[in-house]
C-alpha cells in the first residue's frame, strides 16, 4: 500500500471532490437516522424496540447495520437489509436458473440488468419488512403495558410503511451514488459507518464502568491512586490487547488465499505463437465473507420472532414462551431476567447452534459462489491446466478438494469470530458476575476490517490513477 502516493493524491481536485461527496452523503445518512417514523410518539416504542433487540440477535444485528436506526425508531429503521436480502436472493437464483446465469455472464450489460432487478426486488421486501416491524413493535408495546397514546388508523399504517420504505430506498440510492461519485463500494461504506457510529455507546458504557470507584481505586506501588476501578482497568487492558490480536488475525484471515498456478498451452497459428504463459487462480480462505453469519443469525432469529408474534396475540401461550426462551441470544440486556441463578446449560444452547449453522452455511454458500465445474470448463476452453492435473473433470475434483480443505479451517475461523460476543460475555460473567454489552460484535468487526481493507485498496488504485502523470 503506497501511503505516500495516497497523501499526495489529496491535492488532486477530483480526489477532493470524491472525498467531499463521501463525507456529505455520510452526514446526510446520519441525519436520516434521527428522523422518526410518523406513527405517534417515537418514545412510545422505545421500550418495545429494546425488548425486540434483547430477544432477537437479528434485531441487534439490524440495529447495528442501520446505525442505531432501529433503536431511534427512524425512517431508516429497515436499513439496507432489503437490499442485502435481495442481493442474496438474486445470487442464489442466478446459480439456480440457467437463463439468469447466462445474463450475469453477459458482460457489463448483464451485470447492470442483475443490479437493476436487485433494486426492484428490494422495494417490495422493504414494504413487507416495514409492515412486519411496525406490527411487531406495536403489539410488543401493547403486550408490555407501555402507554400507547395513539391508535393508528389505516392511513397511519400506510404513511409509516411508505416513510420506512422510502427511507430504505433512499439509503440504497445514497449507497449507489457513493459508488459512482465516490471511492469504493457505497453500500459497504454505509454499513461500515453504521457499525462505527455505535462505538460511542460502547465507549461510554466502558468509561462509566472504568471510573466507578465505589469498590475502590487503583493503587500504583502504594504512592499514587488512580481514580479508576482496578478490576475493570485490568479487564479492559487485557481486552484491548486481545482486540488488537483479534484484528491482526482478522486481517490475516481475510487476506489469506491459496494460489493455484495455471499453465496455458502454447499454440502456433501461422508465424505467430500464443499461450505458453503462466497465470494464477487465487482461492480465498473465507470466500463466503460474512454471508454465512447473516444466514445463521436470520435462521436462529426466526423462531424467536414467531414466538413474539404468537405471544402478542396470546400472552400465556406456552409454545411461544418456549420458542422465545430457547432461541433468544444471551446478552447483557436479558442476562438478569433469563439467568437469575447464573449460567446454566441453556446459556450454551444458542451459541452452540449459532456456531454449527455458521460452519454449515459457509460450506453451502461457498459451493454456490465458487462453482468448480464451471471454472474447470472455462480453463479447458482457454487451454489452461493445473500442473499434474488433467483438464476437465479431474481439475474440478482437484478444486473441490482444495476448497473443502480451505473451508474446513475458514468455516471454523468464521464461527469463532461470530462467537466473540458470547466468549467476551462469558469471561465478564465469570470475573464480574454479569456480561457487558458490546455494540461491535465479531460479525461487525469482520465487516469493519473487510470494508476498510477493500476501501483502502480502492483508494490506493484511485491515487495511482490521479498521480500517474507525475511518474512519466
Image: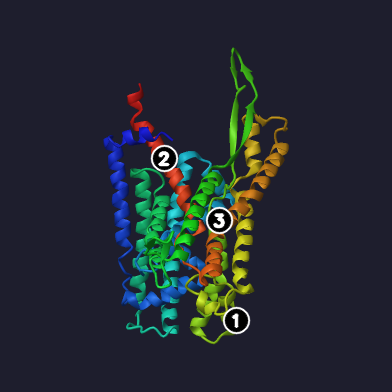
Say whether residue 123 is visible. Answer: no
Front residue of 6 and 462: 6
Q: Earlier in the sequence, mark 1 or mark 3?
A: 1
The answer to whether 135 is drawn above or below residue 59 in the figure is below
Front residue of 406 and 148: 406
Q: Residue 31, position in %: x, y?
A: 29, 60
Q: Residue 465, position in %: x, y?
A: 37, 32
- Say what secondary structure mark 2 lies in: helix
Front residue of 257 and 362: 257
Say whether residue 141 is visible. Answer: yes
On-image quarter of the C terminus: top left
- Say what secondary structure mark 1 lies in: helix
Q: Residues within 10 Å of mark 3 (few under 14, many from 20)?
A: many
From the viewer's perspective, is 351 left or right of 113? right
Q: CA distance from mark 1 to mark 3?
A: 32 Å
Q: Residue 297, position in %: x, y?
A: 54, 63
Q: CA distance from mark 2 to mark 1?
A: 51 Å
Q: Which residue is mark 1?
A: 319
- Say what secondary structure mark 3 lies in: helix
Q: Which residue is mark 3?
A: 417
From the viewer's perspective, is 96 left or right of 121? right
Disc tally is 3
Q: Which residue is mark 2?
A: 458
Amino acid at each position: 500500500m503506497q501511503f505516500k502516493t495516497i497523501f499526495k493524491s489529496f491535492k488532486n481536485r477530483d480526489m477532493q471532490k470524491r472525498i467531499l461527496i463521501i463525507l456529505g452523503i455520510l452526514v446526510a445518512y446520519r441525519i436520516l437516522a434521527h428522523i422518526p417514523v410518523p406513527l405517534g410518539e417515537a418514545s412510545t416504542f422505545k421500550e418495545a424496540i429494546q425488548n425486540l433487540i434483547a430477544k432477537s440477535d437479528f434485531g441487534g444485528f439490524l440495529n447495528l447495520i442501520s446505525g442505531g436506526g432501529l433503536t431511534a425508531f427512524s425512517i431508516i429503521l429497515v436499513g439496507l437489509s432489503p437490499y442485502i436480502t435481495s442481493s442474496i436472493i438474486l445470487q442464489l437464483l442466478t446459480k439456480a436458473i440457467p437463463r439468469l446465469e447466462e445474463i450475469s455472464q453477459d458482460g457489463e450489460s448483464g451485470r447492470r440488468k442483475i443490479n437493476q432487478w436487485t433494486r426492484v426486488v428490494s422495494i417490495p421486501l422493504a414494504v413487507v419488512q416495514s409492515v412486519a416491524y411496525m406490527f411487531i413493535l406495536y403489539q410488543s408495546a401493547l403486550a408490555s403495558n407501555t402507554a400507547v397514546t395513539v391508535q393508528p388508523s389505516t392511513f397511519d399504517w400506510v404513511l409509516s410503511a411508505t416513510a420506512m420504505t422510502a427511507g430504505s430506498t433512499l439509503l440504497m440510492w445514497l449507497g449507489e451514488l457513493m459508488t459512482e461519485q465516490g471511492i469504493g463500494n457505497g453500500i459497504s461504506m454505509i454499513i461500515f459507518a453504521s457499525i462505527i457510529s455505535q462505538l460511542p455507546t460502547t465507549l461510554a458504557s466502558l468509561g462509566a464502568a472504568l471510573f466507578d470507584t465505589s469498590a475502590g481505586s487503583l493503587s500504583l506501588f502504594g504512592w499514587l491512586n488512580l481514580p479508576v476501578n482496578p478490576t475493570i482497568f485490568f479487564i479492559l487492558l487485557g481486552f484491548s490487547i486481545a482486540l488488537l490480536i483479534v484484528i491482526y488475525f482478522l486481517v490475516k484471515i481475510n487476506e489469506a488465499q491459496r494460489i493455484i498456478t495455471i499453465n496455458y498451452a502454447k499454440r502456433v497459428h501461422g508465424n505467430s505463437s500464443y499461450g505458453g504463459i503462466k497465470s494464477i487462480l487465487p482461492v480465498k480462505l473465507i470466500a463466503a465473507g460474512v454471508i454465512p453469519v447473516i444466514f445463521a443469525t436470520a435462521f436462529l432469529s426466526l423462531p424467536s420472532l414467531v414466538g413474539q408474534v404468537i405471544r402478542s396475540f396470546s400472552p400465556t401461550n406456552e409454545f411461544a414462551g418456549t420458542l422465545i426462551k430457547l432461541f433468544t441470544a444471551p446478552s447483557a440486556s436479558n442476562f438478569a431476567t433469563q439467568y437469575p441463578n447464573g449460567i446454566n446449560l441453556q446459556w450454551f444452547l444458542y451459541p452452540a447452534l449459532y456456531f454449527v449453522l455458521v460452519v454449515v452455511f459457509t460450506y453451502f454458500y461457498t459451493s454456490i459462489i465458487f462453482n468448480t465445474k464451471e471454472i474447470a470448463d472455462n480453463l479447458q476452453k482457454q487451454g489452461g491446466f493445473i500442473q499434474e492435473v488433467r483438464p476437465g473433470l479431474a481439475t474440478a475434483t482437484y478444486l473441490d478438494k482444495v476448497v473443502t480443505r480451505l473451508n474446513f479451517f475458514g468455516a471454523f475461523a468464521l464461527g469463532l469470530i461470530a462467537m466473540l460476543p458470547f466468549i467476551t460475555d462469558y469471561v465478564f460473567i465469570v470475573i464480574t458476575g454479569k456480561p457487558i454489552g458490546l455494540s461491535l460484535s465479531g460479525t461487525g468487526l469482520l465487516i469493519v476490517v473487510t470494508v476498510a481493507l477493500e476501501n483502502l485498496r480502492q483508494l490506493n488504485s484511485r491515487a495511482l490513477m490521479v498521480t500517474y502523470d507525475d511518474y512519466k
